[in-house]
Amino acid sequence: MARRKRYTPQVPKKTGIMVNVTSLTDMFTVILVFLLQTYNTSEVQIEPPKDLRVPTSLSEGVLTQGLEMTLSKDSLLLGKEVVAQIRDGDLAQNSKDSKDPNFIPALFESLEKTSKDSTVKAVKDGQILLIADRELSYAIIKKVMYTASMAGFPQVKLITSSQ
Amino acid sequence: MGIKKFRTHYEEFELDLTPLLAIIMKLVPVLVISSSFLQLTQIDTELPQIVKQAIENQNQNPDKVAQIRLQVEDNKSINVSVTKAGTTETLSIAAENNSLNLNALNTQLVEIKKKNPEVFKIELAPNDALTYNEIVTILDGSRKSNSNEEFTFVDPKTGNEVKTDFLFPEVVFNNIFQ
């Protein structure tokens, strides 16, 4: 007696691997929304140095054009150029003027040169964007503002991070 | 007699998400590069036109409106002086736990603003030892009231009463040349 063949249902064979991308799309949509929220539309892009912490403020002002001046714990930069060194929260001795302790000669010269060479209206008008470390004292900021005023840059805009 | 068709399986609508995923895959790197995770702002901002006019009016007629001066001392106390018609009133806000008493300062500035709604500018004379962060908190505290109170002042150009939530948005550092 012949043995009965075991019944096997006819299952159609899949020709390719079907990957379910729904969850991946969900994840990417969330990332996309987050990135669109943090997208910066301001015409001015400022990147403070890594070791510099700007103060937080309630101000919601959009950045405007101006000459970038960075005051970190160890140096004073005009654009990318280092114009003075800072030691223990104050200007290094060789960066100060012997007659006027509030005057920074190297900064004055750089500002005058930049003002002459620049074609940007905001720079010609004397606007400075001051990116300073939150822990620096007013004494050093005062010296920078004093020298900037003398060099024809009376409008100092303080750069802060939003809360 | 018609033959009834039995449903052998559930029909599912399959949406092909592959092109959408391809677009997102291209968008994400672009946005990651151009996103700024540190949102920077600036303090000296554009003010409403009427407030700007009031500030200009104050600059042109400094003797007609009150002059408000904040002086921060070594011990973090703040002296607020208001000079109007030749007389000066001064009051001191004591430090709280060796730090600036910003709530008391804001309350005091609201009272001054109520008496002098046409004034939008103050002079700030911080102490040399004050940190940049503390100066920014003073600027924040003198810009708007903590309780979002509104003040009514007369527009110098039209003579109409206008409401604003600004206290003293224009701050001048008056000890730079001292």
Image (tube, helix red, strand yellow):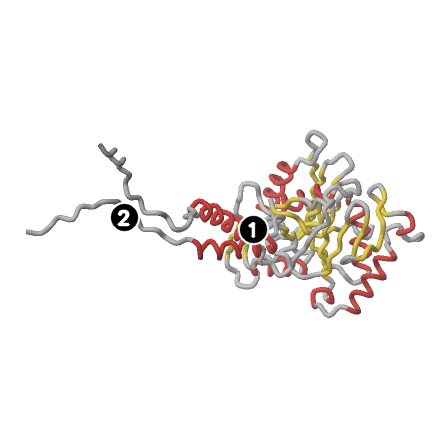
Q: Position of residue B45 (x, y in %)?
A: 62, 56
> Could you tell whether A34 is left or right of A53 in the image?
left
- The residues tagged by marks 2 and 1 sit, at their Cα atoms, a distance apart of 42 Å
> Could you tell whether A151 is left or right of B104 in the image?
right
Q: Which residue is mark 2?
A: B11
Vertical comparison of A4 with B24: above or below: above
Q: What's the residue at 69%, 29% (across, down)?
A: B97
Q: What's the residue at 65%, 52% (across, down)?
A: B43
Q: Position of residue B20 (x, y in %)?
A: 44, 55
Category of crowding for the residue at label 1, using alpha-carbon neighbours closer than 10 angstroms: few (below 14), some (14–19), many (at least 20) = some
Category of crowding for the residue at label 2, using alpha-carbon neighbours closer than 10 angstroms: few (below 14), some (14–19), many (at least 20) = few
Mark 2 or 1, which is nearer the eye? 2
Q: Position of residue B73 (x, y in %)?
A: 76, 38
Report in which chain the residue with disc 1 lies: A
Q: Which residue is mark 1?
A: A38
Check whether the beta carbons of the residues at disc 2 and disc 1 lie within 8 A of each other. no
Vertical comparison of A90 with A127: above or below: above
Vertical comparison of A17 with A155: above or below: above
Q: What's the residue at 50%, 51% (across, down)?
A: A32
> Could you tell whether B48 is left or right of B70 in the image?
left
Identify residue type, mark 2. Glu
Regarding mark 1 in the picture, which secondary structure is present there?
helix
Q: Position of residue B112 (x, y in %)?
A: 62, 44
Identify residue type, mark 1. Thr
Q: Quadrant of residue B31?
A: bottom right
- Mark sitting on residue A140: none
